[in-house]
Amino acid sequence: MKERILHTFQTLRERFAWKRNIRRLDISHAGKWYIALTIALGVTALASGNNAIYLIESLLLAGLILSGVVSERQVSSVHVEFLRLQARSVSVTSDWIVVRNDSKKTIFCLEVGEWKNGKFTSLAFFPKIRALETARARSTQSLSTRGIHRWDGFAMATSYPFGFARKTKVVRRPGERVVWPAPLLLKSKNTPEPHGERGNRHAEIEIVEGEIRKYEWTDDARLIIANQSLRGLGAMVRNRRPILKEAEVILDVRQEPGDAFERAVRKASTSFYQTENAELVLLQAKGRKKISGKQAALNALALIQPEAP
């Protein structure tokens, strides 16, 4: 009974793994001509009984079989990892794609990409990976909009060795990532920084405990320390230093959706790309919401939606 249960569990696991790993074959233009020629020669060989045509037909069929076997080995003998960094919209991601060749043979012309909505998008191309070697490449993906980017899995594809077709192996591992809004570009060094609406710009004065200095004519006379001044050193005051408050970046979300709102979001995000000391203030229909920290603010700006008045 126990062995039967284990066998059933193993069968279900294999079926589940088969559903996760899908093969797809996309025939190229040259491959269509190759197949058409193979069919035509096959019909001719059957009609004529010519041994030479049979031999040519066998070679053509052998080429198709060899192409399928080699391409299957290519996509089945690699292990893929994605090292994803924070993404910004309207710019190429800084992700790394790491591929390890687990076989004892060299792999050629391998593509690794994203699988979404039944489509394969190539992110990196590896012309050659030696046996038992690990290679890595930068991703070429560019995400056009801010917000949540989702995918259904990743895939490996190759057209090696003859280019008749591209075989794709799909691994269904869905995921998602937050895409920060793109900052506004500064036209020149003399252009003012587009910080948007900001508050708390003025500095406050703090008295430094334990530090005194000589009185200057610009100091307030009410700050003179009497007991220290009577020791013969002249008028003395406590040392002071300015403390800058964190800037407030204000975004009014009570707007209609459109280009104006998206530009306001990008304008607000620019401040956080340029400084770490800022707070995001969202003006919403239900009141003000304050968000502290660069990462938290940019995450909020990536997901914020307008509230039409």
Image: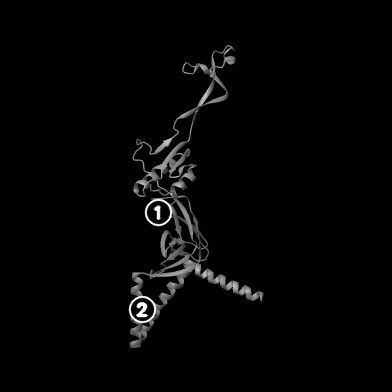
Q: Residue at x 52, y 24 (%)?
A: 240
- The secondary structure type at the circle numbered 1 is strand
Looking at the picture, tell me which residue is in the foreground, 134 or 261: 261
Res. 291 mark: none
Circle 1 residues within 10 Å: few <14, some 14–19, many ≥20: some
Which label sits on residue 38?
Answer: 2
Q: Residue 144 at what x, y percent from top left?
A: 38, 53
Q: Is residue 32 above or below residue 277?
A: below
Name the N-terminal-most of marks 1 and 2: 2
Q: Amino acid at mark 1?
A: Ser
Q: Secondary structure at mark 2?
A: helix
Amino acid at pointer 2: Thr
Please identify the quarter of the rendering in which residue 165 is found.
bottom left
Q: Nearer the viewer, residue 41 or 279?
A: 279
**Which residue in the protein does label 1 denote?**
142
Residue 226: x and y, percent?
Answer: 57, 14
Q: Is residue 55 visible?
A: yes
Q: Position of residue 238 (x, y in %)?
A: 55, 21
Left or right of residue 109, residue 259 in this image? left
What's the residue at 41%, 61% (across, down)?
Answer: 121
Q: CA distance from mark 1 to mark 2?
A: 41 Å
Q: Residue at x 38, y 77 (%)?
A: 60
